[in-house]
Amino acid sequence: MPIRVSRCRLCESETRAFQPYAEVRGWNYVSCANCGFVFLDPQPTPDELRAFYDSQYQYDPESYKNSIGRQKVWLDYLESAIGSCGSLLEVGCSFGYFLRAARQRGWTVSGVEPGGDATDFARRKLGLDVVKGTISDLKNDRRRFDAVVAWHVLEHDADPRLFLRITTDLLKPDGVLAIRVPNLDSTVSRLAGKTWQWLSPPEHVCMYCKSTLAHLFSEFELETIVCTSSRGNSRNIWFEVARARAKKLLNSTFGGVGEGCTTASFRPPPRYENRAWYRTVEQFFEIASWPVEAMVRVSRERAGKEAELVIFARKPARSVARGRP
């Protein structure tokens, strides 16, 4: 059974500071009144999450492969911050396509990935140095890296401070940690509300905005060198808002069309991304909104209102504080 949270995962305020944020498929997101951090309460146990990822969680390798072209810009950021290519660890590297792109640029790459199929693919098909596991499995690793990246991983972790402690230890002095997470301050999050696609339990345990992620980084004395937002892997904002509004209407009219539940469900919602009609509607929104998007996207990114929050931070040359235990 999911376990109750006794203190805020970020500032350690007690439960009396928790405020309701959203209820999604029987799961409750709460917001800490002290620091604003949003997380599930109760939360799935580690064993429940492992079982969920093994049996229910799915990610299309082709979709991941096709997204890499848009992600290569983050290699430009890393190379600018470090001054050259170096050693790179990707946490939650999935099928390994980002690591392959980095290797082609001259990086020495390694990865850690909890999914067995994805790990096997990265090893056998792409010839990458990838181990099966999570960041906790590297807490005693003696290697040190010029860069550690985690693309849409931190929101899956129930203990973000432990995650930061281990990743910071894995960095060389002056090394760079790069994080991308769903952005609760984004325009699409505000407009879509609790039916925003990335407000997705049980896999998304903790949700971030600029202030909460900056708070977490500052505890480990990481110096932010890039803080921006990006569309990244998200869908067209207008399509996503329309999809969210349609889902809300269906939920209120038909009781959730099979998705409504009163207890926390580990059964994923229906997926339509590979349906022809779904792709057609999404493409329509891409084309129809292009003139508006061309005018407002850059300003939305600069204002920190795009769907993904992106932070690059540098570990100081001196020893860093390890944060509260």
Image (cartoon, grey):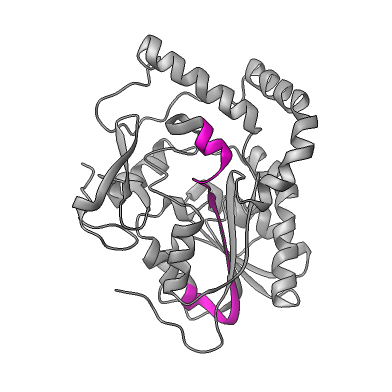
Q: Is residue 132 left or right of residue 124?
A: left
Viewport quadrant of the N terminus: top left
Nearest the camera: 8 or 148? 8
Q: State the image quarter where residue 296 is shown.
A: top right
Q: State the image quarter where residue 292 is shown.
A: top right
Nearest the camera: 115 or 296? 296
Relative image position of residue 92 (x, y in whole percent): 52, 56
Using the rendered image of the protein, determine whether residue 72 is visible from the camera's viewpoint: yes
Nearest the camera: 260 or 186? 186
Q: Is residue 216 above or below residue 2?
A: below
Q: Is residue 180 above or below residue 168?
A: above
Q: Look at 45% across and 15% down and name the residue there.
A: 249
Magenta stretch contains residue 195: no
Relative image position of residue 151 (x, y in whole percent): 57, 54
Q: Look at 74% across and 55% down and name the residue there.
A: 72
Using the rendered image of the protein, determine whether residue 272 is visible from the camera's viewpoint: no
Provide the residue span drawn in magenta. 168-191
Q: Is residue 325 left or right of residue 206?
A: left
Q: Look at 75% across and 77% down and name the residue there.
A: 83
